[in-house]
Amino acid sequence: MVKDLSRLGRNYLEVGNFIENIIPRYNLRFISINENVDSYLKPDSIKTLEIPFKNLMNESYSKDSSNKIRTSLKASKKSGNFITNIAPFGYVKNKKDIHKLEIDKEAAEIVEKVFLYALRGNSRNQIVDLLNENHIITPSMFLNVKRGVKTATVADKWTVRMIDSILKNKTYIGYSLQNKINRISHKNHGKVNVPEEEWIVDENHHKPIIKEEYFNQVQHLLYSGNSKSNKKGELPIYSGFLKCRDCENSLTRDSHKNRKEAEYYCSSYKRNKTCSKHFTKESILNEVVLKSINNFIDMVSDISDRINSIYSESNNEYMENIKKIKIAEIEKEINKYNKLLDEIIEDFKNDYILKEDFDKYNKEYLYELNRLRLEKDKLNINEKDNLDLKWIKRIKEEGKIKELNRNILSSFINTIYVNEDGSIEIVLKYASQYENAIKALKYAK
């Protein structure tokens, strides 16, 4: 017995099959009160044209309602509202506005720990071991025990899959990523993955737990084509650091048992010969990288003494001077691009350049102007981490390096480029801070 046919179901085919086949086959009595249907007292009442017509209307109403709800939810997500039952691990929903996220400090510490282990050069398997050995609570266990949130499963041990779900998640750098999964239809509640270009992305949705530069470095260290762990789950020392200078692809490590040491080749060359070898040996890398890092430590130690003598440990004065220098440099660039814009507008008015050339340069110059203004705004608001003196202390604490390991590389190196002739270029992690320090010394004079 149902109040009306819509309570029986809103799938036209399934409801029709139930009424026309199941009821007579099993000699069931079916009653629908509003439609005055009774298969026992009024057998003909379920055979009228009104029944399939109403079933069709019910399905149409269901489909229309489903589409309206989907459209409404999508519009809400696009307007910046975070719509989900449970906040991502590391965050909680704002008590005043459930569509906004706030950092859960206790959970965020676990997220930071996972990224820290990755930045120190550990493989995903090694991170799993470290977390389990240190009895760090898993995300599902944390939500279940400490926040009273019920999850589908509760794991007491970390796995590589959990590590990936944290390290690859842009939520931790302030991104809101929604519309990643959809139901197939209002009738089929199965889920399908949505193509990435159709995701709803808001890049500055909430406060990040992890800096974007650290997040990007982890992607390069652990998820580039060059980042493959051995049978023990350990990453080779240069995994994630080496790139071809020409094609920008990673270098492949070749450690054949008949060779005395590992060799590296451009992955494009190894795969399909679309680039040249860019060959080097691990011993050459060790020598060049160790020498570069130690030279840089010497250079930093030298300017450290000079900075201390001028700024007398006044970090605030140092940061203010660096900020003034950088803002002056940015304003100089802004003036340059404003002048270039004025010139191409004048050239276009005088028919010196074609419209397509004007559009091209206009777009390029406007892009640079917006980029520079954003950079200037960041300096005025915060972004002080690249301006202070803490990095000098960190480097001096390391002292002279006697032997390389992944932890040392992660501390000093962003990227190592190998040229076609085998020569090596190293992009140091603190190169920009060193340049800032040199500018600060000149400014003080």
Image: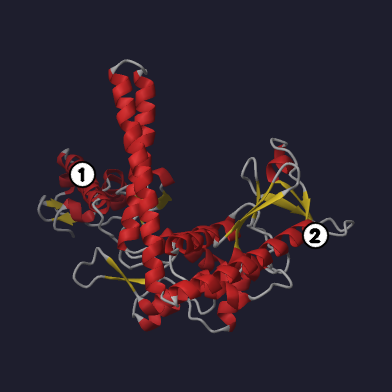
Residue type of the residue flagged with mark 2: Ser
Asked whether, in this view, residue 41 is left or right of residue 407, the answer is left
The quadrant where residue 411 appears: bottom right
Asked whether, in this view, residue 421 is left or right of residue 297, the answer is right
**Which residue is outermost to the right?**
258
Q: Nearer the viewer, mark 1 or mark 2?
A: 2
16 and 387: which one is in front?
A: 387
Element type at mark 1: helix
Q: Quadrant of the N terminus?
A: bottom left
Q: Residues within 10 Å of mark 2 (few under 14, many from 20)?
A: few
Residue type of the residue flagged with mark 1: Asp
Q: Which residue is mark 2?
A: 283
- Image coordinates of residue 306 in percent, x first then y, are 53, 71
- Image coordinates of residue 294 in percent, x first then y, are 68, 67
The quadrant where residue 94 appears: bottom left
Q: Is residue 184 visible?
A: no
Element type at mark 2: helix
**Which residue is outermost to the top?**
351
- Residue at point 14%, 58% (across, down): 3
**In the drawing, what numbered circle is on residue 97?**
none
- Residue at point 27%, 47% (across, down): 11
Residue 290 vs 279, above or below: the answer is below
Q: Which residue is mark 1?
A: 64
- Image coordinates of residue 383 in percent, x first then y, are 38, 63
